[in-house]
């Protein structure tokens, strides 16, 4: 798997799947989640509502997949990152699970190229340096990484871009 880091808007990236830092309701919100729902259109929301009606949303650390609607990707993998408060080890494991479950879901859907945002570092207040290290560790130790051609970390700001760039 080739790993790249970009400073960009994830909604503009042409890959098989982009990952959404979603909330448990799957109904959109702020940050990356809001941007994906706004630019992706009603089709994403309709599929999220259908998933919600079937299983009651998405739990922290888990992932679900929908169409990408109007986005240049084929799919959106929605994963719910942990809010940073309380049990640090539990939160670290939940964040690692976001990457693991997203990658497993990608493989189940024949995704060869995938783009990840910086999960949980916005309003969920996960420390940026720790989140970057967890993400990179989980990606590089993924046992089926040879089945993914390219993984892109898409960083919205320069600080995150530099953190990920230094880890590669």
Image (cartoon, rainbow, N blue to C red):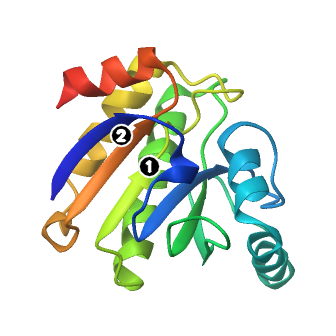
Query: Residue 132, image x and y in percent?
Result: 37, 29
Q: Is residue 64 left or right of residue 140?
A: right
Query: Residue 66, image x and y in percent?
Result: 63, 76
Residue occupying the point 27% across, 50% down: 139
Please name the residue that numbered disc 1 is placed on: 116
Q: For the N terminus, give its image quadrant.
A: bottom left
Q: Tag on residue 29?
A: none
Residue occupying the point 57% across, 51% down: 11
Query: Residue 53, image x and y in percent?
Result: 86, 81
Q: For the C terminus, give its image quadrant.
A: top left
Disc 2 secondary structure class: helix
CB-based contact (under 8 Å), mark 1 and mark 2: yes
Quadrant hosting residue 78 = bottom right
Circle 2 crowding by C-alpha within 10 Å: few under 14, some 14–19, many from 20 = many
Residue occupying the point 71% across, 36% down: 31
Q: Tag on residue 135?
A: 2
Q: Which is more foreground, mark 1 or mark 2? A: 1
């Amino acid at each position: 798997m080739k790993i790249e880091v970009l400073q960009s808007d994830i909604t503009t990236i042409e890959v098989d799947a982009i990952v959404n830092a979603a909330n448990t309701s799957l109904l959109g919100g702020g940050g990356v989640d809001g941007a994906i729902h706004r630019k992706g259109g009603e089709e994403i929301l309709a599929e999220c509502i259908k998933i919600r009606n079937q299983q009651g949303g998405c739990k922290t650390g888990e992932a679900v997949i929908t169409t990408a609607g109007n986005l240049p990707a084929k799919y959106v993998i929605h994963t719910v990152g942990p809010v940073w408060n309380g049990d640090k080890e539990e939160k670290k494991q939940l964040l690692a699970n976001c990457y693991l479950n997203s990658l497993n879901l990608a493989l189940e859907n024949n995704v060869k190229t995938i783009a990840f945002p910086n999960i949980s570092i916005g309003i969920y207040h996960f420390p940026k340096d720790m989140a970057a290290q967890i993400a990179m560790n989980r990606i590089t130790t993924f046992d089926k990484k040879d089945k993914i051609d390219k993984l892109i970390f898409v960083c919205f700001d320069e600080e995150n871009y530099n953190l990920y760039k230094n880890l590669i």
